[in-house]
Image (spheres, rainbow, N blue to C red):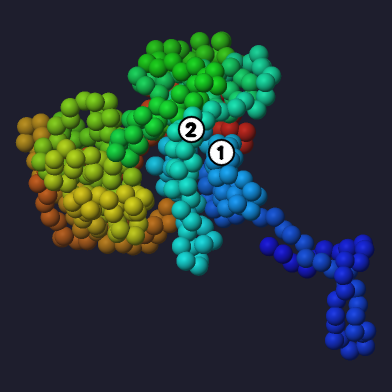
Amino acid sequence: MAKVVKKVTKSLGQLRTQSVGVSAIETSPLRPAYVLKTPPCKNACPNETDIREILTTISWTEDLNKSYDESFARAWEILTEKNPLPSVCGRVCPHPCEGDCNRGHKDGAVGINSIERFLGDYALEKGFKFKKISEESYPQKIAVVGSGPAGLSCAYQLARRGYSVTVYEALSKPGGMLRYGIPNYRLPEEILDKEISRIQELGVEIRCGQRVGTDLSYDALQSKYDAIFVAIGAHKGKLLGIPDEDAVNVFTGTGFLNEVNSGKKVEVGDKVVVIGGGDTAIDAARVSRRLGADVTILYRRTKNEMPAIPEEVMGAEEEGVKIRFLAAPVEFEKEGNFIKRIKCQEMTLGEPDQSGRRRPVPVPDSYFYVETTAVIAAVSQEPDFSGLNFLRESDDWIKVDDGMSTKIDKT
């Protein structure tokens, strides 16, 4: 953005004026001053990726007499300054950057997410490796609890700066929700494995099958490491608070996806009802459809309020998933250990709630019933604090100060 505010100490040219009483040619002391602002796309990115610099690097290839291979390599380096998982994010990121892209006010947003995926896959194809920022090695040892995207990113940034990093993962393979919470059709396992391996090549050690707090005490980590980064994710799905939801055919969204991604045989029958409107709900619905079931999603608001990625919602509908909007479950009908039917109620939208979305309000005497062979509650999730309850205060999540440190020593 430019505005005329800058005074100059020497003549940079002449300015013609037609002001009364002023000579026809006069030197102006003012010149446009460039005011640097963060592009809206970068501002919307949780990683603050320098999107403009990446796009500029590629678009100026021919003007700078460079090859596209050179430009792609440099663009990948800029991208991975903040994000070590571009192939992963290029597939699963909800790309808020595109929602704030300036081009959206003209013709259409730049396909930033597709560019990220291309650069990530290009780097894997060419065998690009991460480079350390410093050849100096520091004596401090760091433990990272959890190998999801936060844990892996932390380990990556520390390792490239010369620190010794060990990652502790409770599950059998690294990746966290990337591996166990996202279906393989969206994120192929081999892509995730390759990007994790590249982080390990920096010297990061990943120890799987070790749950801190149960298999390994937190005190042991504190005695062995100089600092601990807690990145346990939110693997624990929440249920609905409806009686009889302990039936054997009721799953949480994250629990269902975990079982499928772990290779377990999951029986859902031929009529699956998914409750929720986020990405986990859509993923669970599409996986159930692939298992051969007729799938209905119940969502208590309208399509405009759905937090799921629009492209994923469209994909679900194209695959035959039915979505009933403005509907919510109120009661389960149980036979033996199984839910056979769900009593539902129609909703209307009232005033906005804390999320900014209009609050669903039950419509009196608007009950209807849905037959089901499996119920998947994908309404919310939270961290599993098993063995780590001391990290949080009251019933809240982990409390941190402005420097992201907790009250626990070294954490």
Quadrant of the image for the N terminus? Answer: bottom right
**Residue 241 seen:** no
- Residue under the point 66% across and 55% down: 37
Under circle 1, the secondary element is: helix
Question: Dot 2: within a 10 Å radius of its alpha carbon, few (fewer than 14), some, or many (20 or more) residues?
Answer: few
- The residue to which callout 1 is attached is 73
Quadrant of the image for the C terminus? Answer: top right
- Residue 301: which quarter of the image? bottom left
Mark number, residue 227: none
Question: Dot 1: within a 10 Å radius of its alpha carbon, few (fewer than 14), some, or many (20 or more) residues?
Answer: some
Q: Nearer the viewer, residue 342 or 290?
A: 290
- The residue to which callout 2 is attached is 126
149 vs 297, left or right, is right
Residue 403 against residue 217 in the figure, above or below: below
- Residue 396: which quarter of the image? top left
Circle 1/circle 2 CB separation < 8 Å:
yes
Residue 84 against residue 99 in the figure, above or below: above
Residue 9 against residue 342 in the figure, above or below: below
**Residue 116 seen:** yes
76 vs 169, left or right, is right
Q: Nearer the viewer, residue 409 or 68?
A: 68
